[in-house]
Image (cartoon, rainbow, N blue to C red):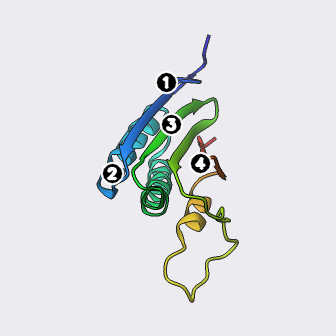
Amino acid sequence: MAREVGNLRQGEAIELEIPSAPEYVAIVRQAVEGIARRMNFDATQIEELKLAVGEACTNAVKYGCKRKGDGNVVVRCVVCADGLLVVIRNPVAECESPQVPDKPDPTTEGGLGLYLIQHLVDEVNLSWESETATVTLLKRLAT
């Protein structure tokens, strides 16, 4: 039997697919907020998670799908024993995989998204394969 995490069961997954347009990112943030609340994340953690997921989805819309053409962003939230795993996938044209910077460059505009995400969640993983970009975020419940 699956262990309960808040009001949800470990292993449960909720998946959203949104068009590659900025106005749909708010829907993902609202869904993540609802899931995190049901898992008993505290208010600060919920805001951090919403900001990180929103930034990752905005990057997917802005940099990913536009290069590839038509495509949707798929967001999968998985309830884990110790937190919430959020996987964001979107089509991309062949490009160099970005690295999470150790420190942002103060002389350039933008480029803070991945740095910010890294400091809002506990784990970040980026991968590119078969013209699909995947950003995986893990936010652990406060102990």
How far apart are the alpha carbons under marks 1 and 2?
22 Å
How far apart are the alpha carbons under marks 2 and 3?
15 Å
Three-letter amino acid code at the position of disc 1: Leu
- Which of discs 4 and 3 lies nearer the camera? The answer is 4
Q: Nearer the viewer, residue 85 or 61?
A: 61
Quickly name the residue at label 4.
Answer: 134
- Which of discs 4 and 2 lies nearer the camera? The answer is 4
Dot 1 or dot 2: first in sequence order is 1
Q: Are marks 4 and 3 in contact (CB under 8 Å)?
A: no
How far apart are the alpha carbons under marks 4 and 1?
25 Å
Three-letter amino acid code at the position of disc 2: Ala
Quickly name the residue at label 2.
Answer: 26
Quickly name the residue at label 3.
Answer: 76
Q: Are marks 1 and 2 in contact (CB under 8 Å)?
A: no
Give x and y (percent) for residue 128.
64, 52
Three-letter amino acid code at the position of disc 3: Arg
In which image quadrant can residue 3 be found? top right
- Which of discs 4 and 1 lies nearer the camera? The answer is 4
Q: Nearer the viewer, residue 121 or 25?
A: 25
Where's the N terminus, which quadrant? Answer: top right
Quickly name the residue at label 1.
Answer: 8
Whether residue 123 is visible, yes or no, is: no
